[in-house]
Image (cartoon, rainbow, N blue to C red):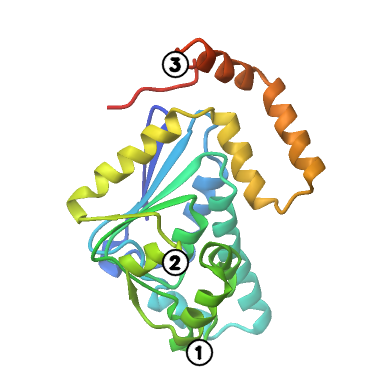
Amino acid sequence: MILVKTEGPVCYVTLNRPEVRNAFNDELIAELTRVFSSMDSSVRAVVLAGEGKSFCAGGDLEWMRRAATYSEEQNYEDALKLAGLFKSIAECPAVVIAKVHGAAFGGGCGLVAASDVAVAAEDATFAFSEVRLGLIPGTISIYVIPKIGEGHARALFSTGEAFGAEKALRIGLVHDVGSKEDLDSLVKAKLKAVLSAGPRATTLSKKLVLEGPLSPEECARRLSQARASEEGKEGVAAFLERRKASFVIETE
């Protein structure tokens, strides 16, 4: 279902159902949720990718066929599991980098939106395709709307139309676009940036967004705590002394 490889502070998580373009089913959802919910504290970055021709083409046909026979309550329980997957990605303490190629449809777009950073091949294709099936992008909307804004979400959710990587970049769903051959270089650049930052500060910075908007008083409190922390003191000292902080990990 998935391939997991950890190299020092970086964990590579790859969807491994290429025969169905890495579409979701019960097992894949459970495995991904387990991996992201139990990420080792030493991991500072996660690269999320897909094996084969596509990143993730949405829901598996057999999974959707079974769901069509469920009662509303059974569907609710099933949807909660999918919601839990996106939540586990968004709240992962490590920085999650989505590496997108081929199709990212429906829940595949949800994976992109739930990630912190996304890079895409210039020929990648995106779609919030749920309405084509008479469904709605319910569980992913929590993460998509803050990324692309209400205007783009209303248009793309209600039409289900496909769009390319350049539009995904323009609306904020992804953050960098390059040729398929350049994807690894784009990921390496993001990893270099993440591994140059304080790991605790990185996690807490994610929380500023996920838990916001915060009051001015709470923002000041969190900044004061960061300044007083060992990591914060080390980072400032290293800057003033013109040396690399102890938390910096060199990459190639």
Amino acid identity at mark 3: Lys
Q: Residue at x 56, y 20 (%)?
A: 235
What element does badge 1 sit on?
loop
Q: CA distance from mark 2 to mark 1?
A: 25 Å
What element does badge 3 sit on?
loop
Disc on the earlier residue, 3 or 2: 2
Q: Return the x and y of residue 9 as percentages of the image width and height.
A: 43, 29
Q: Residues within 10 Å of mark 2 (few under 14, many from 20)?
A: some
Q: CA distance from mark 3 to mark 2?
A: 35 Å
Whether residue 97 sits left or right of residue 80 in the image: it is left
Given this view, does label 3 or label 1 mark the residue nearer the observer?
3
In the picture, the disc for residue 134 is: 1
Contact? badges 2 and 1 (CB < 8 Å): no
What element does badge 2 sit on?
helix
Disc on the earlier residue, 3 or 1: 1
Q: Residue at x 62, y 22 (%)?
A: 232
In the picture, the disc for residue 171 is: 2
Whether residue 51 sits left or right of residue 67 in the image: it is left
* Numbered label tally: 3
Up/down of 225 relative to 152, above or below: above
Q: Residues within 10 Å of mark 3 (few under 14, many from 20)?
A: some
Q: Which residue is mark 3?
A: 244
Up/down of 89 relative to 185, above or below: below
Instruction: Examine the rendering and report whether any part of residue 6 can be seen.
Output: no
Q: Residue at x 44, y 35 (%)?
A: 194
